[in-house]
Structures are given as C-alpha cells and as structure tokens.
Amino acid sequence: MRILFDSKLQQFKDPFGTLLPEQNCTLRIHIPSQLQAVKTECRFSGPDGESIMTVPMEKQGQIGAYDIFRGDFCFRQPGLYFYCFYIHKPIGGFRLFKFGDDTNMEAGDLWQVSCIPADFSVPDWAQGATMYQIFPDRFCRSGDTDLTGKLEPYTVHEDWNEEVHWQPDRQGRVLNNDFYGGNFKGITQKLDYIASLGVTVLYLNPISKSFSNHRYDTGDYKTPDPMLGTLADFTEMCDAAHQRGIRVILDGVFSHTGSNSLYFDKDRTFGGNGAYNSQNSPYYSWYQFKSWPNDYNSWWGFDTLPTVNKLDPKFIQYIITGDDSVISHWLNAGCDGFRLDVADELPTEFLSILKTHLRKLRPDALLLGEVWEDASNKRAYGISRRYFVDGQLDSVMNYPFRTAILHFLEGKDDGKALANTVRAIQENYPPQVLLANMNLLGTHDSARILTALVDDFAGSRAEQAARHLTMQQYQTARQRLLMASFLQYMLPGMPSLYYGDEVGMEGCKDPFNRRPYPWGQEDPILLEHFTRLGQLRKEHEALRKGDLTFFEAGDGKLGFSRSCGGKRLRIYLNRSDESWDVPGNKLLFGSGTQISAPTWLTLSPMGFCVTEE
C-alpha cells in the first residue's frame, strides 16, 4: 500500500491551484495504518531552499486501511513555495516526496504552490481570446511604400513567391536584409480575412525601424520601419482592427538594440551621436562596454545586437516612464499591449516598473512574456523569476502545451503525459493567466507546425532550403495538424495561429518558417477547419473561459470537458488504431466521427469531436 496524496485532487488539497494571501488551504494525506504514523508535518521552503514554515498535521480519522492526517495553513505574502511531508513513526521517521502524481518515501520532487497578489488581474479581453501572429514583412503587400530612411543595404524581392535569402555573403554573414514589402496597408486590407478566422488579438513581430527583416535589431524604437509604412498607416490599421473587435499587440524588444541604431550608431547612420561614437552620448549609459568602443556586451555574442543595461535610469525613462516613452508612444498610436521578447533576460525590477506604468497608461493593456518553460517556477541566470507571484506578466507563450501536443501526435505519448502537462500548468498558473496563455503550435522561432509534425530534420541551411514534404508526408502532417489544432483550440488559453499555418505552409526553422503567405495557393481543407474552430470559440463561452476536467487519458485517447455557466462541452480525441465509442448525440464539430446510436458516437482512428450536453 502506498501513501496517498495528489495536489491536483481536491480531496487532498483544497482549494486547487494558486492561493491568495491569508487564504486558508487544507491538506489531507492518506497514510496506511500499518505504517503506524503518530504525527505528520508539512515542511515548506522557498525557491532557493530556505525554510519557510512547518505545518503540523493531526490525525482526523480513518478510511478503510488508511489514517487521514489534516493540516491547515495560509501564506501572508505572495511567493513561490515548495513542500514535502515528514512522517513520524514510534521510532524515527521519513520524508515523503512527489513522484509524478504519486508519492515516494525515499527521494523525488517537491510539491509546488504559489501565492499570488490579491489584486492580480488580467485584461478580460485576453482571457479566452484567439490570436493571429504576423511576421510583418511576409504577410501582405499593398500599394506603394516610401522607402526614404530605410536602413541600407537591402534588397526587395520582385516576385512575392521567391525563396527567402539564406546564403551567407562573402564574409560568411547571413544579413537577413532581403524584404518582400509586406506592410501595414496589406494587413489592413486582409483584416476581414483575419476576422473570419475568429481572431480577436493580432500580434505583430517587431515593426520599428531596423536593418533586418526580422527587426529584432531595433534602430529607432519610436519610428515604424519605412518598408511597413508610416505611423499614420499603423494607426489606421489599429483603428480598422478595433472596428472588427480585434486588439493589436506589439513585440517589445528591450533586452538589446541594433548596433546600427539611433542609440549605438556603430555605422554612423544616425549622425554619430550614439554610444559607440561618444562617451558623452545621451545613450552611453545604456550599454555595457568592457573597453569602449569595440568591446561590449551583446546578445548571445552577436555584435550587431548590443545588450542594454535594463536598469539604467535613462533607459527606463526612455522605454517606460517618460512623458513620451516608447510604450506610451505606441499605446497612443493604437496598440493594446506588448509581447516581451526574451522576458527571462529582463530583470525583475524592470518588469515590475513596466507592468505598473503600463497599467497606469492603459488599465486594460496586456503584457505577455516570451518564456519557453513552465513560467511559474522559471529560474534564469540563477534567479527565481516572479512573473506571477508579483503579478508581472499577464500571459506567457505556452511552449509546454506545444511540446506535449507534438509528442502525443507523433506517438511518443499515449495521452497520459499530455494530460499531466496540462494539469500541471492548470495547477501552477493563476486561473486568469491560464485563460490568457498564448497556446501556440507554430511561431517565428520554430519550424512550421506541418513540418514539425512529420520531419525533425536538422541539416544545413542549404539542405533545409531544398527540403519539402512529400505528398505522403503532407497528407500525414495535415491529418495530424487537424487534430493538433483541434486540441489547441479546445484547451484553456488563447490559441495562437502563426500566419499561413491555417493554409498549409511548411518549412524548417528560420528563415524557412518565415516565407511569404501563399495567397491564392491555400489548402482549402485546413482553411475551412481553422475557420470553424475560430467560430466555435466565439460561439461557446465554455471554450473561452470554462473549467477543465479530464476524464480519459491513455491508450491514445483523450477526453475532457469544458464547463461554464451551467453548460458543459465534452471533447474527445482518438489517436489510437481502433475505433472509440463515446456518449453524446449533440455533435458541434468533429472529424472522423459518426453517430452510431441515438446517444452514441463512434470516433475512427485520428477522429475527434466536441459535443454539448
């Protein structure tokens, strides 16, 4: 017999998930009577292993062959906490650890619980939203563009369907300075198309004036890249999006700038007043020179991306607190929030100042962070991050869901690991963050989801450029994507659609995941599927804000429900090799699903559906 404790079940921990300051929490642990436990303690520690408190647990009664021990506690301050149990016997005792969803008497992990601020709020419009991500240069080009002031050198593809440049120059550098001319007017022109996908949030990769096509090498924070259009064009795009119920968020790139920028100006493009040119530059204190001017800290060693001192008062004033700060500039121009590039590299103090001031400028502005792991217990550079326990971020990029979905579709997991991943995020994240999580399958930093589902090739760029899915691979990938995206849209959070994934774009990692949108060459099966998924989320509040409960996970089968306002939807996915009969007769949407009896449905292999009770 094993000692029983599962923090995800209310019979053992009540309430489930994160706590508020002074909120009482009850723990119950079931210990086999044969162990003769005389008392039990719950021992809490902080993220750095420091002891926080010990909670005594008294024997409450007995159920069958188990003694039930109960303890109550609360936290006075927000924070990230970990705990294990110590079981006292008549002689000696032992610690009890976490082992998956089970327990282990010898070694294992600690359980986790977070206490979040009582006033932690997330914009309502982001909870249960549907996002569309655009790499601005590659989505749509409309009209002529005045390229005065465009940073040189650059090339413009004459043919929208040409291959992206990937070859290094004579010095072995990949400059990323080829452009297709996608612009704000092009996005505005396609807003009805975007809205037809059920989209309520538009996320744009960087738009500021920059040398490269990805624009993460900021040249001027407050000026749009001339290739994209003017500030007026941007505002017009935002206004048109808002008229369609679509919010707009921008990439905030605050860990580094470009070397070819107003602030560093290594090439003297901006008049020679940058930190590289003069120690009297107003931007000199932004940077960290080991030996001025040529030896300086840069992002991951790329000398074209000098890192900034994020806590420099002048930098904070310019980006956040000044009357015409970068964030106020773009909010006034029409955007509704920011996605923070490499959030792990932004100090806690910087994030706190940014979040506080952002909320003062716009009470419902969104702050979303790029985090690749479980953000609740993330450690970066030896420091435990406080994204949620200090209310610093409203949302994060949900890569854990992506990894779990891929493993399930590729047959590396029978469904149990996916359910456990979802449950862990559900337990560790504040509920309002869970509903605003950016649930992604494809992004500008990962291989196209169609490719990722069937081909993990990691060869040279030349090999990747020539690599395309065979017809058989495409058919397999599309079938898997239908199920993967269905799961993505059914789970709590904000499903994020990377431009072109909805019509069958393929490609390995950067730059082949950033090819132009294939207008006129769309896969109609995928497009119809994603359109219907977007409509479903708009029609059913349970998919946007409903509670989540798994009732099936294993043997290639998944079943869970989403409940809200007295309505309950049941979701089924069958990745097994056999048909699966499930209860239900009110079918809302599905594939590979047949009504087999008045109250039963049959899911074929790779079939999925959502029903309403």
Image: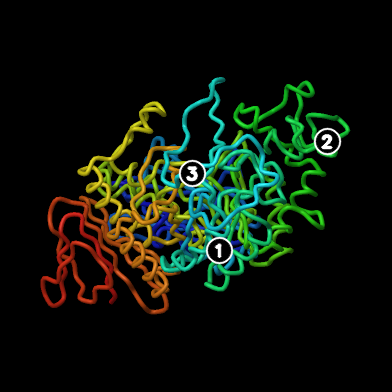
- Residue type (three-letter) at the residue carrying disc 1: Asn
Chain-order first, disc 2 or disc 1: 1
Quarter of the rendering occupied by the C terminus:
bottom left
Instruction: Report the colour scheme.
Output: rainbow
Q: Secondary structure at mark 2?
A: loop
Residue 94 appears anywhere in the view: no
Q: Look at mark 2 in the image and give the residue it sits on.
A: 273
Where is residue 2 drawn, in percent x and y?
31, 46
- Image vertical order of residue 267 relative to residue 47, above or below: above
Classify 10 Å Cα crowding around label 3: few (below 14), some (14-19), many (20 and above): few
Closest to the camera, between mark 2 and mark 1, is 2
Q: Look at mark 1 in the image and give the residue it sits on.
A: 24
| Extreme residue toward the right, this view | 280
Closest to the camera, between mark 3 and mark 2, is 3
Where is residue 489 drawn, in percent x and y?
38, 61
- Residue type (three-letter) at the residue carrying disc 3: Glu
Q: Secondary structure at mark 3?
A: loop
- Image vertical order of residue 569 relative to residue 342, above or below: below
Q: Look at mark 3 in the image and give the residue it sits on.
A: 158
Q: Are marks 3 and 2 in contact (CB under 8 Å)?
A: no
Q: Which residue lies at the image location 44% right of the left edge and 40% below the top edge?
A: 109
Classify 10 Å Cα crowding around label 2: few (below 14), some (14-19), many (20 and above): many
